Image: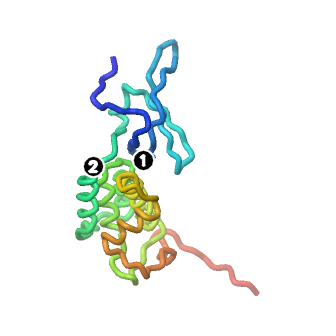
Amino acid sequence: MPTKKMDFKSGQYVVYPTQGVGKLLRIEEQTIGGQKIKMMVIDFDRNHMTLRVPLERAELSGLRPLSSVKKMDEAIASAKGKAGAKRMIWARRAAQYEENINSGDPMKLAEVVRDLQRRTATDTMTFSARQLYLRALERMAQEFAVLHKMDLDAASEKIEDILGVPKEIDLNAVEEDEDVEETEDEEE
């Protein structure tokens, strides 16, 4: 018996933790293993993907409606704070950041953005840190964009403006990952 704590409607935007913001296209009934199951059909246009989630498992899967503008503003404000302690080795921190990104929670996404953002134009970051930062920023920007009716790039830019991320930085300036060494081939 499905529990219907959350009321989803076709056409509304929803957040699926591991994929980000998608649009609920419809709720359809499918027969699987002889049982009729109501499925939510969600389109993730940016990923060119359609996901079907059983309605009765929606809450358990972490599917949720968009945050309020107020909650998103609170998350962005928390990303302005001082970076968290970096006492763990990078592999553990990276795993924690990955978990936060896949949670879909705006506050946890803000934590990743806060910890990994550049504070000055001369700051550099490793390739893997940059990838995590950009993924967390994109997930926040997806929700921000829908809430403020703007495109994703404008939303990312707006969030970075609010955070005070320097504009003159070169996003391609990355440090070598600590545990990966590159070798250069010299031409003779």
At 57% from the left and 74% from the top, the residue drawn is 182
* Position of 31 relative to 12 (above/below): above
Q: Nearer the viewer, residue 125 or 88?
A: 125
Residue 169 appears anywhere in the view: yes
Residue 72: percent from left, percent from top: 28, 55
Q: Residues within 10 Å of mark 1 (few under 14, many from 20)?
A: many
Q: Residue at 53% across / 38% down in the picture? A: 50
* Three-letter amino acid code of the residue under disc 1: Val
Q: How is the image coloured?
A: rainbow
Mark 2 / mark 1, whichever is N-terminal = 1
Q: To which residue does mark 2 refer?
A: 68
Q: Residue 181: x and y, percent?
A: 54, 73
Mark 2 is surrounded, within 10 Å at the Cα level, by few (under 14), some (14 to 19) or many (20 or more) other residues, namely few
- Up/down of 108 relative to 40, above or below: below
The answer to whether residue 32 shows anywhere in this view is no
Q: Inspect the image, locate mark 2, and give the three-letter code of the amino acid beneath it.
A: Ser
Instruction: State the SS at label 1.
Output: strand
**Which numbered disc covers residue 188?**
none
Residue at the far right in the pictured view: 188
Residue 21: which disc?
1
Residue 6 lies in quadrant: top left
Picture coordinates of residue 42, whole percent (x, y): 47, 37
Q: Is residue 93 left or right of residue 34?
A: left
